[in-house]
Image (cartoon, rainbow, N blue to C red):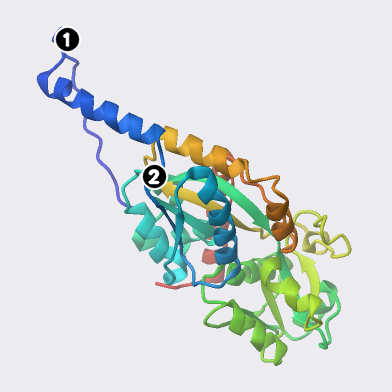
Amino acid sequence: MAMTRQLPPQPARDTGWLPRRAALALPFLAKAARADEAWPNRPVRLVIPFGAGGPIDAIGRLLAEHLRDRLGQPLVIENRPGAGGSIGIRAVVQSPPDGATFLLTSASLASVPALYPSQGLDPRRAMTPVSLVAEVPTAMVVRADGPYRSVGDVMAAAKARPATLTYGSGGVGSSNHLSGALFAQAAGLRLEHISYRGAAPAMIALFTGEIDMVFASTIETLPHVAAGRARLLGVATEARVPALPEVPAINEIVPGYVALNWYAIAGPRGLPEPVLARFTETLAALHDLPEIQARFAAAGTSPLLTGPEALVRRLDSDVPQWQRVVEAAGIKVE
């Protein structure tokens, strides 16, 4: 992490008059303030640090569609995948805090400090939190015609045959990888992680019998469950999900196992307060729209669209959690 050396405070000088440079700057500062209040006055870039076509991409395009009319400017989706999301995250961190660039990302934002320590990308310090968009349950799924019918079945098999049961994910260090690693640690099991180039190939590997299970969001898994290809054994939430009352929370079987995925919007550090206020208010106004509610419910979740404080709390909780998981599992991606 880069260190910033603080200079000792200098004694104040009461000159009794406004310095000429400051006086000359006042018109420009006033103009900037008016620009903040008029935000947005040009298209807004929404960076998604994952490839097009995924579940978070669909959410981003849904929000962009509804925000366009309310903000009076289009939100241009820019997919910047790679390096566990850190490429897209860095692109936003390095952008000017002028309200022209924002990030829509997943819970992987909280694992970046642990997975890429040399990059110094700690979202708690490098970004302006805007909104916690949704909390998306992580699901444990197995093949529909496979031998496992419950979380207990998986645990019994893993204890009988240590380090032989496998789980797949869309890449080393992905949120699905870390969710599986956390389950193994909480349950005292030895599971083998198999990495694929994306969540979709991991699901295909599950259906063909290459792997035993997948930890993935309900957005990714429920369509396969509905089609009869996968069996949903549990969700990694504190309590059962209202939309899936018959599905146990894994926390009921493995106390303390909670691995929520979530989607959030953040901007560069130093985002002007008028921009932040208008964006959060506009997002909150989408919460009760029937289409928003229906599209989120179809994914087994509901919209939150909170203010910044909820995202601050989530990062304060999740960043140290994933640091512990990454260290305990010895996960290396750099």
- Residue at x-position 80% and y-position 54%: 239
Q: CA distance from mark 1 to mark 2?
A: 36 Å
Where residue 74 appears, as percent x and y from the top left, is 46, 53
Q: Position of residue 86 (x, y in %)?
A: 42, 64
Q: Look at the picture and state if 157 lies above or below 246.
A: below
Q: Is residue 305 above or below residue 240?
A: above
Q: Earlier in the sequence, mark 1 or mark 2?
A: 1
Residue 173: x percent and y percent? 52, 70
Q: Quadrant of the C terminus?
A: bottom left
Which residue is located at x 47 percent, y 69 percent? 84
Residue projecting furthest to the right: 246
Using the image, tell me which numbered label, if any, was put on residue 197.
none
Camera-side residue: 321 or 267? 267
Q: Which residue is mark 2?
A: 99
Is residue 120 visible in this depiction of the protein? no
**Which residue position holds label 1?**
14
Regarding residue 88, the answer to whether it shows in the image is yes
